[in-house]
Image: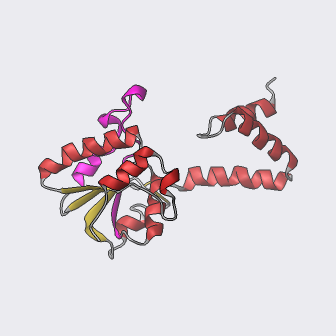
């Protein structure tokens, strides 16, 4: 007979960013809550799996197809912002600075994990380029994100598109003294005239 607590800990530990200790704490917390609270959590997980899916055009998570961003006629249809994952769209939206379309790659290049261009939604991006003037590459500022950005630039520039990359640098309110060399270097490289 299997141990239900061990099974719950094992399942929680499979979630990204959740290690064995955190999984154990979460499982013990769930043991303490009222059955209705545990049922609400289980129901919410099942509802997400039943009612949400990837947009057939941009791969955003949505309850309707196509998604709200793809169907919004007020959006700038000459620009497309490429992100790694669906959850990367909301931070861009919260800035209030971008009003174009999105395309989610569903990952980033990572040769050591066996993720090449064929495992990302790059062909779907290439199919969406009619009428696009600028592709904004908003991949993460890490090795995989940089590799993905360089690959996309190499594929997209020969098509006559303007390919831009998010600027990375010092946060507002940050002190130069506490800024790491890579961030400070990017701030210098991405400086603009005043």
Work out whether 150 lies above or below 131.
Answer: above
- Residue at 33 percent across and 64 percent down: it is 101
Left/right of residue 16 with respect to residue 38 in the rendered view: left
Position of residue 75 measured from the top left corner of the image (x, y, whole percent)? 33, 72
Position of residue 155 measured from the top left corner of the image (x, y, whole percent)? 20, 44
Using the image as rendered, state which of residue 35 and residue 93 is in the foreground: 93
Left/right of residue 187 with respect to residue 91 in the rendered view: left
Position of residue 58 measured from the top left corner of the image (x, y, whole percent)? 36, 55
Q: Is residue 13 visible?
A: yes
Using the image as rendered, state which of residue 73 and residue 139 is in the foreground: 139
Using the image as rendered, state which of residue 24 and residue 175 is in the foreground: 175
- The magenta region covers 99-128
Quarter of the image that includes the C terminus: bottom left
Q: Residue furthest front?
A: 177
Q: Residue furthest top?
A: 1
Where is residue 114, by image quadrant? Answer: top left
- Residue at 36 percent across and 51 percent down: it is 186
Using the image as rendered, state which of residue 30 and residue 152 is in the foreground: 152
């Amino acid at each position: 007979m299997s141990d239900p607590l061990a099974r719950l800990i094992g399942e929680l530990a499979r979630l990204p960013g959740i290690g064995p200790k955190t999984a154990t704490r979460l499982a013990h917390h769930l043991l303490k809550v009222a059955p209705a609270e545990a049922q609400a959590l289980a129901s919410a997980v099942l509802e997400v799996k039943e009612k949400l899916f990837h947009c057939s055009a941009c791969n955003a998570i949505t309850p309707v197809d196509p998604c709200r961003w793809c169907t919004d006629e007020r959006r700038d249809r000459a620009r497309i912002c490429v992100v790694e994952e669906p959850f990367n769209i909301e931070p861009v939206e919260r800035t209030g600075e971008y009003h174009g379309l999105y395309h989610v790659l569903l990952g980033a290049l990572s040769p050591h994990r066996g993720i090449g261009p064929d495992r990302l939604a790059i062909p779907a991006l290439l199919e969406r380029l009619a009428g696009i003037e600028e592709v904004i590459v908003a991949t993460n500022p890490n090795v995989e994100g940089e590799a993905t950005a360089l690959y996309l630039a190499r594929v997209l520039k020969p098509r006559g598109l303007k390919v831009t990359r998010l600027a990375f640098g010092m946060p507002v309110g940050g002190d130069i003294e506490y800024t790491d060399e890579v961030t400070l270097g990017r701030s210098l490289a991405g400086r603009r005239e005043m």
